Amino acid sequence: MTYKVAIIMGSASDYPIMKEAELLLKDFGIPTHVEVVSAHRTPEKMVAFAKAAKSNGINVIIAGAGGAAHLPGMVASLTSLPVIGVPIKSSNSIDGWDSILSILQMPNGIPVATVALNAAKNAGILAARIIGATDPEIGSIIDAYAKQMEAAVEESQERLTQR
Ligand code: RP5
């Protein structure tokens, strides 16, 4: 089977956050592949995964990790695919800044698109936008999603007005 978006994470304990990306992409009809890949505990698996990702049909990689969060940056250094990093406030995070800065502060040449703390849903939307830039079907799903959000804001405004 060919997957479009890989969702990887440093530990299964990250999954309650990372599943938001999986659910969003499922809603958009984009196939996902979900796997635990740890930069520190399974470094050789990480290298093999990142090097094979493109030839395995993956278009975008979403990588979540907490604490000393090296997974997104290391994976980005091993593939030319776009990598979206999700900083996670995990059991070994001080306050989440450790994960944010570990993922955000990449050196020039190896970018990681970093979303907000625990914002796996936004990572899913960004992955869909990357695919939607060249896939008109996905592009129109994203347009419809934006319209739905707009309508929801209008409805909430009406409820406020009628209070
Ligand atoms: C990181 O350490 C993982 O991404 C996770 O956020 C954190 C804690 O992992 P566990 O000790 O819960 O397995 O590498």
Image: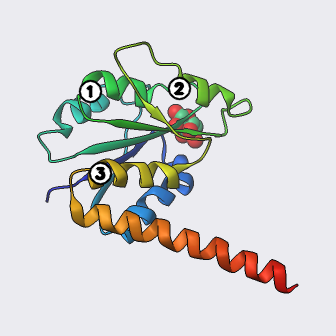
- Residue at point 51% right, 36% down? 65
**Dot placed on the residue nearer the N-terminal end, 3 or 2:** 3
**Dot placed on the residue nearer the N-terminal end, 2 or 1:** 1
Label annotation for residue 104 = 2
| Residue 87 position within the rendered picture, expressed as x and y whole percent measured from the top left | 56, 37
Say what amino acid the circle numbered 3 marks: Val
Judged left or right of residue 36, residue 100 is right
Quarter of the image where one finds residue 99: top right
Residue 39 makes an appearance in the image: no
Residue 116 makes an appearance in the image: yes
Q: Is residue 148 above or below residue 74?
A: below
- Residue at point 38% right, 62% down? 25
SS of the residue under disc 2: helix
Label annotation for residue 5 = 3
- Residue at point 26% right, 27% down? 47
Alpha-carbon distance for marks 2 and 1?
Answer: 20 Å
SS of the residue under disc 3: strand
| Residue 116 position within the rendered picture, expressed as x and y whole percent measured from the top left | 59, 41
In the picture as drawn, the residue positioned furthest to the bottom comes out as 162
Q: Which residue is mark 1?
A: 47
| Residue 76 position within the rendered picture, expressed as x and y whole percent measured from the top left | 33, 27
**Dot placed on the residue nearer the N-terminal end, 1 or 3:** 3
Alpha-carbon distance for marks 3 and 2?
Answer: 21 Å
| Residue 59 position within the rendered picture, expressed as x and y whole percent measured from the top left | 23, 45
- Residue at point 44% right, 65% down? 23
Say what amino acid the circle numbered 2 marks: Leu
Other residues around mark 1 within 10 Å, as few (<14) / some (14–19) / many (≥20): some
